Amino acid sequence: MGVLLLIISAITFLIFYALPSTDPAQLRAGRSGSPELIASIRHNLGLDKPIYVQYYRYVKGIVLHFDFGFSYQTDAPVRQQIVDRLPATISLTVGAVILWLTLAFPVGIVSAVKRRSLVDRAAMGGALLAISAPVYWLGLVALYLFSNDIGQFKIFDGAGTYVPISQNVGTWFSSLLLPWMVLAASFAAFYARLLRSSLTEVLHEDYIRTARAKGLSERTVILRHGVRAAILPLVTVLGLDIGILLGGAILTESVFNIPGIGRLAYDAIKASDYATIQGTVLFGAFFIIVANLIVDIAYAVVDPRVRY
Amino acid sequence: MSTPLTDIAVDPGAGPESESVAIAARTPLELFWRRLRQDRVAFAGLVFVVLLILMAIFAPLLVKLFGIPGPNTQNAQALDDFGTPTGPSSVHLMGVDQLGRDVFSRVIYGSRVSLEAALLSTFFAVTLGTIVGMVAGFYRGWIDTVLSRTLDVMLGFPSLLLGIGLASACSFGNGCLGGLIKPGLTVVIVVIALAAFPYIARIVRGQVLSLREKEFIEASRSLGASDLRTIFREILPNLVAPIIVYSTLIIPQNILFEASLSFLGVGVQPPTSSWGQMIGDASGNFGEVWWYMLFPGVALVLTVLAFNLIGDGLQDALDPKGDR
């Protein structure tokens, strides 16, 4: 895991070091920065050193002091910036995950059991439509229809109303309702489709017939014997999706103006703030790797056949 | 009870003449085509995509046919006294944007970017992914280890973040790598292809790992076929079905990826019109000028939906286990 992170950090470093055509020192010095100022900034940031020295310093900082360096733009420590932004991203992710799972399970199960019925066709048609809609467009349409500032039906809080949970739980909740629904829509659709196809396959298995032959109720057969086996593929994608979202839901955060990791990364990229970009990319990769690890462990819990 | 009987009597296909016709063997391709044709929904998707491609190719002609201004023609008359764009009217079917450009015309031209970016990036991703996957799966050993770990690293990368980073680094000024990669559509295609190919490579590798143990591979080798011949003449044909399915499944994702990059302002550069970029432009004042946000989005959703329908249909049609 450490090795993987090291490689990813090296690649990120290389990409953002070698590719850009803009000079970070110049950006920081501003439009009227004198050559001397630019040179001194470059020296202070260590940008005049060869790339491997810069990289070595960077990794050393992380390993020894858990120090991700300082933002080129705001001088704030990158670690602090990420920690500050994390609650918003976690709020968004957790709420959306709960919402999409509670939606996807009943829909997926009913669709699989009542295959090719009207309910199934309607649900799967709707799911396909939801998958096809980009989240930011869905967000804009939702804001246009339902937000209480510019919306046609003033039901939910609009964009930019996010407050931390520690400040006011009620406002926090109501401000996130619309983002949760928008973010969850395509995921719910995807999971419902996945569960449907997985459960359909499982229901053809011999042990399902055995369970029915034992005289178990249809409910027990489907829920205890069918769904339990059918959620395995869902566990894999769920872990990855949570990992990716925790690394920053860039599009949703930017549409709803939620100050999360995704926005931080996006703003940093726009401002060529390499230290912050590095931090957020590493952070995102870290979450994806951890999520992979948790998925492996969860497999053993869910699937009794897996032994370590 | 009588209806089935009359059915048989009326049905000309069941007559004795047709039985005497030699029964031609159906190739897998024919079987596949028949199954796909029966899938009305997938077929509708296919028709939509064909029409879309025609629309993209003949965009200038269409614009002339409808008598609407070109995608970059700014018409200050279409803005009201306060400079606010006007909505759908008989002159501008989908209204105009903040520069007075016709939205309908821009939506038509936007299909070019979407299709070009999605199809080309998918082509590169599939080509690269197939080659890497075949090499890794066929040679196994240390080659596989190196390639697979590399793929792991690429999959561990937050792809949208990487895309934004690469695209923004290359989108300003003269491009990146000393002007090798120019800003605009090329960057977008490279980014999407890089993000998508590891998935293809993984799937292909898995398939090749099991294929290479089959008897016909052993037979080919015992006849003295070279590795290259075995890979391309024996293994590759067996990969066509899964590759087609996954290609059609990643096309819609790639369309959305291009739109996301353009939405964030790091994709296709103005004044070229792209659906994602139009939505991004509209996100500032969509409260008043909803049409500028709505129509490109609808075009995007319909296109992605159509490709998804085709993908689903192909998957069913090519899956021998499918009970349909």
Image (cartoon, helix red, strand yellow):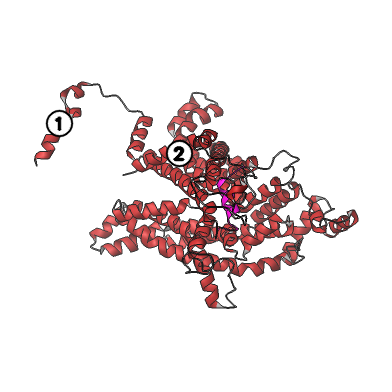
Q: What's the residue at 58%, 70% (across, down)? A: A162
**The N terminus of chain A: image quadrant:** bottom right
Residue lying farthest to the right in this orientation = A36
Amino acid found under the numbered disc labelled 2: Val
Q: Residue furthest left?
A: B2
> On screen, B58 above or below A204?
above
Which label number is shown at residue B10?
1
Q: Which of A108 and A282 is in front in this view?
A: A108
Name the element at disc 1.
helix
- Residue designated by label 2: B49
- Residue A289 visible in this rendered orientation of the protein: no
Q: In this view, does B204 lie to the left or right of B313?
A: right
Exactly how many numbered labels are in the figure? 2
Residue B174 x/y as whole percent:
74, 42
Front residue of B225/A41: it is: A41
Q: Quadrant of residue B116?
A: top right
Q: How far apart are marks 2 and 1 (CA)?
A: 38 Å
User: Is residue A206 something that shows in the picture?
Assistant: yes
Depth check: give the residue in front, A247 or A145: A145
Magenta part of the chain: B272-288
Of the pair A208 and B96, the residue shown nearer to us: B96
Identified by mark 1, the residue type is Val
Please tell me how crowded label 2 is: few (under 14), some (14-19), or many (20+) other residues with Cα within 10 Å.
many
Q: Residue at x 48, y 34 (%)?
A: B54
Residue B183 percent coordinates (x, y)? 68, 42
Q: Which residue is drawn at 74% across and 48% down?
A: A20
User: Upstream in the sequence, badge 2 or badge 1?
Assistant: 1
Q: In this view, does B281 lie to the left or right of A116?
A: right
- Tell me the subunit letter for badge 2: B
How far across and how far down the image is residue A142, in percent?
49, 61
